[in-house]
Image (cartoon, grey):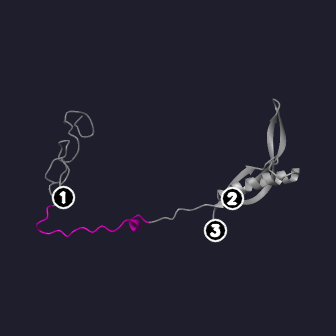
Amino acid sequence: MAPRFEYRVVPAPAKGKKAKGVKTPQARFALGVEAVLNDMAADGWEYLRAELLPSEERSGLTGTVTRWRNVLVFRRPVVMPVAVPADASAAPVEEPPLTGDAKPPSLPSGAVSAEGAGDAAPENGSPEGKPDIPPDLPGPRGNG
């Protein structure tokens, strides 16, 4: 599988950066670009290229003008999460064998065990599990 990247585009510095021993405008400009490159590299971004791109901007109330912008393009690999099966990450749970002395686990209050499920009537009172509708009322189960 080919590596995936994420990209970041930042404006190139428009002015140079002053520093001790840096006298010429070209050296100051280079120092400004170098600072941006090193800051991005410290965060894991790899310098890819510089681009000159058009940008349409408003001029006055109704007009537009095209300005050209210098930008620096960086990229870094995207760390894809590794899918780990849920069963593989959990340690296997061993249950103790049941003996004749062991009691089955208790059920929450109001719950019916599987053995007694057929004996109890549903909560709504009807043995079929359907709501009770008197026969004299109109409806799907009434006479009307």
User: Helix, strand, or loop for circle 2?
Assistant: helix
The residue that mark 3 highlights is 2
Q: Quadrant of residue 114?
A: bottom left
Magenta span of residues: 85-103
Q: Main secondary structure of the magenta part?
A: loop
Marks 1 and 3: in contact by CB < 8 Å?
Answer: no
Q: Which mark sits nearer the N-terminus, 1 or 2? A: 2
Apparent side of residue 97 relative to residue 81 in the rendered image (left or right): left
Whether 86 is among the magenta residues is: yes
Q: Residue at x 58, y 62 (%)?
A: 79
Per the model, the C-alpha gap separating discs 1 and 2 is 60 Å
Q: Amino acid at mark 1?
A: Pro
The residue that mark 2 highlights is 41
Q: Residue at x 63, y 66 (%)?
A: 3
Q: Amino acid at mark 2?
A: Ala
Percent coordinates x, y for residue 82 in the rendering: 51, 65
Q: Amino acid at mark 3?
A: Ala
Extreme left residue here? 101
As rendered, which of 107 and 21 lies closer to the eye?
21
User: Helix, strand, or loop for circle 3?
Assistant: loop
Percent coordinates x, y for residue 66 in the rendering: 84, 42
What is the crowding at mark 3: few (fewer than 14 residues within 10 Å), some, or many (at least 20)? few
Does 63 sit above or below residue 12? above
- Foreground tag (1 vs 2): 2
Q: Which mark sits nearer the N-terminus, 2 or 3? A: 3
As rendered, which of 19 and 144 lies closer to the eye?
19
What is the crowding at mark 1: few (fewer than 14 residues within 10 Å), some, or many (at least 20)? few
The residue that mark 1 highlights is 105
Return the mark for residue 53. none
Percent coordinates x, y for residue 135 in the rendering: 19, 36
Whether 78 is among the magenta residues is: no
